[in-house]
Amino acid sequence: MTHATTPAAANAVELEGKDLPAYCPNPAMPLWSSHPRVFLDFKHGEAKCPYCGTAYRLKPGTVVAHH
């Protein structure tokens, strides 16, 4: 998991296929900022946590496998 570096997504957490299924709070977040775990539903490669507002996006070229 890496943070995106483009200006438009400066605050988005960028995820790869190996990071899926994704949830928030993510493993890199400090314990003090915890909230109930929420699995993220990516629409058009982006998702936002309903609790803390953290933005997530899939790294370009990431393929999401469907079950």
Image (tube, grey):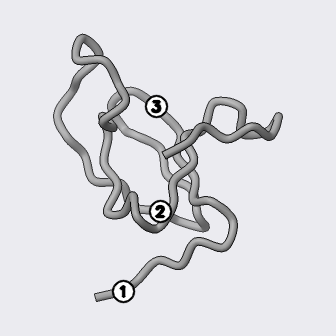
Q: Position of residue 58 (x, y in %)?
A: 57, 59
The residue under label 2 is: 42
Question: How far apart are the alpha carbons under marks 1 and 3?
Answer: 25 Å
Whether 40 is drawn above or below 38: the answer is: below
Which mark sits nearer the N-terminus, 1 or 2?
2
Q: Secondary structure at mark 2?
A: loop
Query: In percent of the image, x 46 and y 77: which residue is there?
Result: 64
Query: In percent of the image, x 31 and y 63: which residue is there?
Result: 21
Q: Residues within 10 Å of mark 1 (few under 14, many from 20)?
A: few
Q: Amino acid at mark 1?
A: His
Q: Is residue 23 left or right of residue 6?
A: left
Q: Residues within 10 Å of mark 3 (few under 14, many from 20)?
A: few
Q: Is residue 1 left or right of residue 34?
A: right
Quarter of the figure that contains the C terminus: bottom left
Question: How far apart are the alpha carbons under marks 2 and 3?
Answer: 14 Å
Q: Residue furthest bottom?
A: 67
Asked whether 48 or 1 is in front, the reply is 1
Whether 52 is drawn above or below 4: the answer is: above
Which mark sits nearer the N-terminus, 2 or 3?
2
Question: How far apart are the alpha carbons under marks 1 and 2?
Answer: 12 Å
Query: In percent of the image, x 47 and y 44: which residue is there?
Result: 48
The residue under label 1 is: 66
Asked whether 14 or 41 is in front, the reply is 14
Q: Which mark is residue 53?
A: 3
Q: Residue furthest right?
A: 7
Q: Position of residue 41 (x, y in %)?
A: 39, 61
Q: Amino acid at mark 3?
A: Gly
Q: Amino acid at mark 2?
A: Phe
The answer to which quarter of the image holds residue 4 is top right
Q: Secondary structure at mark 3?
A: loop
The answer to which quarter of the image holds residue 13 is top right
Q: Which mark is residue 33?
A: none
